[in-house]
Image (spheres, rainbow, N blue to C red):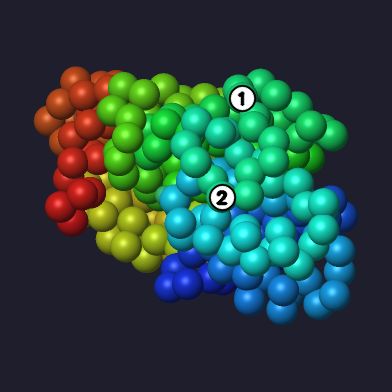
Amino acid sequence: MRVVPIPCLTDNYAYWLPELGVVVDPSEAAPVLDVLGGAALRAVWCTHHHHDHVGGVPALAARFGGLRVYGSGRRPIQGLTDALGDGDRLDGVEVLSVPGHTLDALTFVVDGEAFTGDTLFAMGCGRLFEGDAAQMWASLQRLRALPDTTRLWFGHDYAARNLAFTGAIVPTGRAATPPPVAMALERATNLFLRADDPTVAAAVGAAPGVETFAALRSRRDRF
Ligand SMILES: [Zn+2]
């Protein structure tokens, strides 16, 4: 499936899915409209309620009559039309509830493409604004169970910073590249997905699992 990244704000990504007429996480409307180039927008998928992911929704809803706006509904999103929960499916799209960064965080998976918002980044994960470490670690374990070939599309471009962070703990030899990244590579090189790996646990001096995850997250917060 064709996925067109749309750089927004400083380091955000929205995504245009032309075959579905869908935009993911439009933080602002103008760059989205530029990329659409007159194509019809049918729906917006919101991974969570943060303004730098949904700020463009009202302007897009005003422009495209009948626009469907999907999100969790557990936190307010202006213009939301359809609330989704874990395991919901819409037209071949699988919705995963992945709380941690926020309690309303969703990942959308369709046709081997996964839109992870601020839950999973290249070599990183989102900060714990609303959830706790155990919740986020559980969410990341669900994501890492996606098939190897799943293409990951992240909510921000933090690859360079996360590469430096990773290199300071357990170097992986990976490069900082723009999305997408295959799950097989992410699972092997993202320390936050490897918190139960004894090598990573030893590097941060914590027990494998949630303790190592929490130690990594707190180090990354100060990095
Ligand atoms: Zn966020």
Instruction: Report which residue position mark 2 lands on.
Output: 78
Left or right of 39? Residue 30 is left
Residue 207 in sight here: yes
Q: Residue at x 32, y 62 (%)?
A: 161
C-alpha gap between disc 2 and disc 1: 18 Å
| Residue at 72% from the left image edge and 64% from the top image edge | 62
Residue 121 position, x and y percent, is 45, 50
Q: Amino acid at mark 2?
A: Gln
Q: Nearer the viewer, residue 170 or 77?
A: 77
Residue count near mark 2 (Cα–Cα under 10 Å), binned few <14, some 14–19, many ≥20:
some
Mark positioned earlier in the residue sequence (2 or 1): 2
- Asked if residue 154 can be seen in this view, the reply is no
Please tell me whether mark 2 sits on a helix, a strand or a loop.
Answer: loop
Confirm if mark 2 falls within 8 A of ligand 1.
Answer: no
39 versus 207 height, above or below:
below
- For image coordinates 18% across by 41% down, the residue present is 218
Q: Which residue is mark 1?
A: 85
* Residue 41 x, y percent position in the rendering: 81, 60
Q: Residue at x 31, y 22 (%)?
A: 134
Residue 147 as seen in the image, left or right of residue 53: right
- Badges 2 and 1: C-beta atoms under 8 Å apart? no
Q: Report the mark closest to the observer, 2 or 1.
A: 2
For residue 209, side relative to residue 193 (left or right): left
Q: Residue 40 appears at what percent x and percent y? A: 86, 64
Residue 95 position (above or below residue 37): above
Task: Name the kind of residue labelled 1 in the image.
Answer: Gly
Q: Position of residue 143 (x, y in %)?
A: 53, 31
Depth check: give the residue in front, 170 or 84. Answer: 84
Q: Secondary structure at mark 1?
A: loop
Question: Which quadrant, please, contains the C terminus?
Answer: bottom left
